[in-house]
Structure formats: structure tokens, C-alpha cells
């Protein structure tokens, strides 16, 4: 009976450490889920590039369910183009929207494109501009198509702004923007 207080203290101390151990286990699980989702996207992208669309869709769907931001973009592209599925512009927009909301800059570009062209949604230049601009914020090669789109949309209203967007895009290597600058007689 003399060791009973020691046992109670030991249980109390171990109980204090239990939440920390649970947090570590939870973080390990979250990290594993993120890694698995990234692996699924990578496998899906490989299948996609090899035209194995049914296999790609399986991987992308699983990665999307795990919350990977790039997966819905690929699913959207598959529905937009009818790759392995029946074309469905509304479904493509829904997937691009998910990717865009999750922060995928290429998904943001494609959502802007759909709004600009009226694909799967009512044409809306303001929404197109907003999504292109969000995508263009990064200012890198991946956001170059959005910068070029902003240049294209600006040409009729503000030529100087259009040139600035084209120059930003050209600076990261976008060929389409270089062609536009040449057409506008702007020297690089």
C-alpha cells in the first residue's frame, strides 16, 4: 500500500505526456497522408502523360480525396478535353475551382480561362481577370500563361498595362508573350 501514492503520481505524469504523444502520432499520420497524396499525383501524372487516362483518373481522384491541390486540376483537364471521360465543361470548372481555392496557380489559370471563354460557366471577364491575377502573383514560369492572358485582356483598354504583363511573362520565358510584344513592336 505504500507504493500506491507513487503509482498515482506515475499515472498522472504519464497522462500529462499522452496528448503530446497523440499530437506526434497525428502529425506523422498527416505527413504520411501528404506524402501518399503527392505520390498518387506523381503516378497519376505519369499515367496521364502516357495516355493511360483511366489509371490516371483513379490516382487523381484518390489524391483529390486526400486534399492534394494539384489533383483537381488534372481531373478538370481530363473533363475539359474528354481524356478518358466524356467531355463535361461544368465538371471541369468545378474541379478547376476546387484546385484554385486550394491554391493551385495552374488551376487558377484554367478557371480564369473558362471564365474568359465562357466554357462551363457564363462568360465573365471580371472573374477571368481575378483568377488570372491570382495565378500571376507568383511571377514564375508556371504563372506565365496567366500573365500573358492578362496582357491579352488588357490590350483593348490599356496598351501600356498589356505590355507590362507581356514583359513580365516574357521575362520568365513565355514564348506567346514574346510574339505579342513583337506584334506590338516592343523591343525586348
Image (cartoon, grey):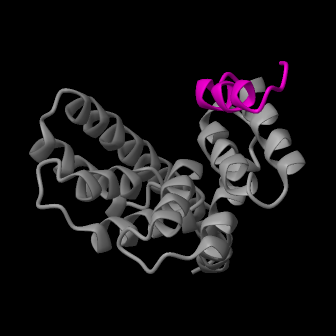
- Can you tell which quarter of the image residue 172 is in? top right
Q: Left of 138 or right of it: where is 6? A: left
Count up the numbered dots. 0
Q: Position of residue 62 (x, y in %)?
A: 26, 56
Q: Residue at x 18, y 61 (%)?
A: 87
Toward the viewer: 100 or 182?
182
Q: Residue at x 56, y 68 (%)?
A: 101
Residue furthest toward the top? 188
Q: Is residue 107 magenta?
A: no
Q: Compared with residue 81, is residue 186 higher up or lower down, i.e. above or below? A: above
- Can you tell which quarter of the image residue 188 is in? top right
Toward the viewer: 172 or 125?
125
Does the image show residue 98?
yes
Q: Residue at x 26, y 39 (%)?
A: 44
Q: Position of residue 71 (x, y in %)?
A: 37, 52
Q: Position of residue 121 (x, y in %)?
A: 41, 77
Q: Residue at x 43, y 61 (%)?
A: 67
- Can you tell which quarter of the image residue 52 is in? top left
Q: Position of residue 125 (x, y in %)?
A: 62, 71
Q: Left of 8 or right of it: where is 87? A: left
Q: Which residues are magenta?
A: 172-188
Does the image show residue 15?
no
Q: Compared with residue 33, is residue 1 higher up or lower down, i.e. above or below? A: below
Residue furthest toward the right? 160
Q: Compared with residue 90, is residue 47 higher up or lower down, i.e. above or below? A: above
Q: Is residue 186 magenta?
A: yes
Amino acid at each position: 500500500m505504500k507504493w500506491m501514492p507513487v503509482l498515482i503520481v506515475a499515472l498522472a505524469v504519464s497522462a500529462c505526456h499522452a496528448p503530446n504523444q497523440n499530437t506526434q502520432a497525428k502529425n506523422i499520420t498527416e505527413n504520411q497522408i501528404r506524402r501518399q497524396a503527392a505520390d498518387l499525383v506523381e503516378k497519376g501524372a505519369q499515367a496521364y502523360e502516357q495516355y493511360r487516362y483511366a489509371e490516371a483518373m483513379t490516382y487523381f481522384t484518390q489524391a483529390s480525396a486526400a486534399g492534394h491541390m494539384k489533383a483537381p486540376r488534372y481531373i478538370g483537364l481530363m473533363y475539359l478535353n474528354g481524356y478518358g471521360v466524356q467531355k463535361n465543361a461544368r465538371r471541369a470548372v468545378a474541379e478547376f475551382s476546387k484546385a484554385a481555392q486550394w491554391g493551385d496557380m495552374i488551376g487558377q489559370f484554367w478557371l480564369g480561362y473558362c471564365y474568359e471563354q465562357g466554357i462551363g460557366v457564363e462568360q465573365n471577364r471580371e472573374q477571368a481577370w481575378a483568377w488570372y491575377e491570382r495565378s500571376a502573383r507568383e511571377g514564375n514560369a508556371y504563372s506565365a500563361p496567366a500573365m500573358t492572358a492578362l496582357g491579352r485582356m488588357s490590350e483593348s483598354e490599356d496598351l501600356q498595362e498589356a505590355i507590362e504583363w507581356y514583359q513580365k511573362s516574357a521575362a520568365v520565358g513565355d514564348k506567346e508573350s514574346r510574339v505579342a510584344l513583337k506584334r506590338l513592336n516592343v523591343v525586348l
